[in-house]
Image (tube, rainbow, N blue to C red):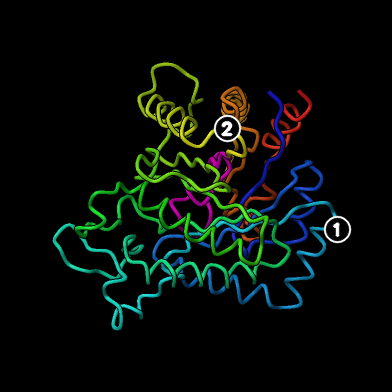
Amino acid sequence: MKLNTASLLIHPEELSREWIDRCAELGIPTLALHPVGGVRAPMTMKLMLDRLETPEYRLLLDEAAEKGLAIEYEMHAARYFLPAREFEKHPEWFRMDENGARVRDMNCCASNEEALDFIAGRAAEAASRLYRSTHRYFFWLDDAHDAFCHCPHCAEYSSSDQQMIVMNRILRELRKTDPEATLAYLAYYSTLTPPRRIKPDEGIFLEYAPIDRDHHTPLSQAGNEKNISQSLYIRELLQTFGAKNAKVLDYWLDNSLFSDWKKPPKPFVADEKVIHADFDYYSDLGFRDISCFACYLGADYAALHGNPDIKAFGDAYRRLKKR
């Protein structure tokens, strides 16, 4: 079935005229900025927001828009929205771990109304600083396998339900100033199973990110245990969220992953067979929006290894766009 759109995610510091030209020449409609995740996420998100205030960086984004590219921003934002420094005044805003202790490491207490209001307000403020952004927002929870709240009130909710509580609250706040706002539910690690108790508000859309898949075997190939599991997750998620506006975020071009998140970046060769097979697979399931990380392919990569070859992604998108 026909695709509607596609995007590539790069680190903000990797944005360049070369990247803009690359996407424009390949017909990739959206370029998204993705600050580094993990424990550095609050710092890298702040650095990106500060960078967006500079005339030089805005000029780059203006050039991207002039060449027909939409600009989006995708980030692990929970610890930026609820900074660890708030723990001294409001420990009850933070998650309770499995041992019954409040900890300031990741996410929040999803049952604390004051925490949710604080997070939603910070999200709206951050959204106002996303220069040239579309009305689609991607404010993910923290980058961890399982860092959710185990307090007596939250214990009845799964990781996915807790994420849904937070996302619903953020979207309601965003729509006070941007009535067209929509917001991603990131299906990733422990939120790959859909929420059962908390329903997504209108305007929440699915973003499926299979980081634990086998990255070198098509998802449709029989007999691969990792990918069989992913197929089950996908079907359940689509039943909950529907295919309308659902988005894939895969890793075919993610040289940060293939370089073990360490610099200098390793040489990279895209697996064209897997890219084309997975585009077909996702499209047949009803996805109309396919995106991919393309980090660690910036100027430092080009200086070491030459310009990266990402043509297969553009070819796969254009092929299904015409279908």
Residue type pointed to by label 2: Ala
Image location (x, y in percent) of residue 153: 24, 58
**Predominant SS of the magenta segment:** loop
Image location (x, y in percent) of residue 297: 62, 53
Secondary element at image label 1: helix
Quadrant of res 4: top right
Q: Which residues are magenta?
A: 247-266
- Of the numbered discs 2 and 1, the one sitting upstream in the chain is 1
Q: Nearer the viewer, mark 2 or mark 1?
A: 2
Spatial separation of the CA atoms under disc 2 and disc 1: 31 Å
Between residue 5 and residue 220, name the one nearer to us.
5
Read off the residue under disc 2.
Answer: 243
Which numbered tag is attached to residue 66? 1
Q: Are marks 2 and 1 in contact (CB under 8 Å)?
A: no
Question: Relative to residue 225, is residue 219 drawn left or right?
Answer: right
Among all residues in the image, which is located at the extreme bottom?
Answer: 89
Among all residues in the image, which is located at the extreme right?
Answer: 66
Q: Quadrant of the C terminus?
A: top right
Q: Residues within 10 Å of mark 2 (few under 14, many from 20)?
A: some
Asked if the stretch drawn in magenta spans residue 281, the answer is no
Q: Residue at x 58, y 38 (%)?
A: 246
Between residue 218 and residue 74, name the one nearer to us.
74
Secondary element at image label 2: loop
Q: Is residue 165 above or below residue 43?
A: above
Asked if the stretch drawn in magenta spans residue 252, the answer is yes
Image location (x, y in percent) of residue 92: 27, 72
Q: Residue at x 66, y 59 (%)?
A: 179
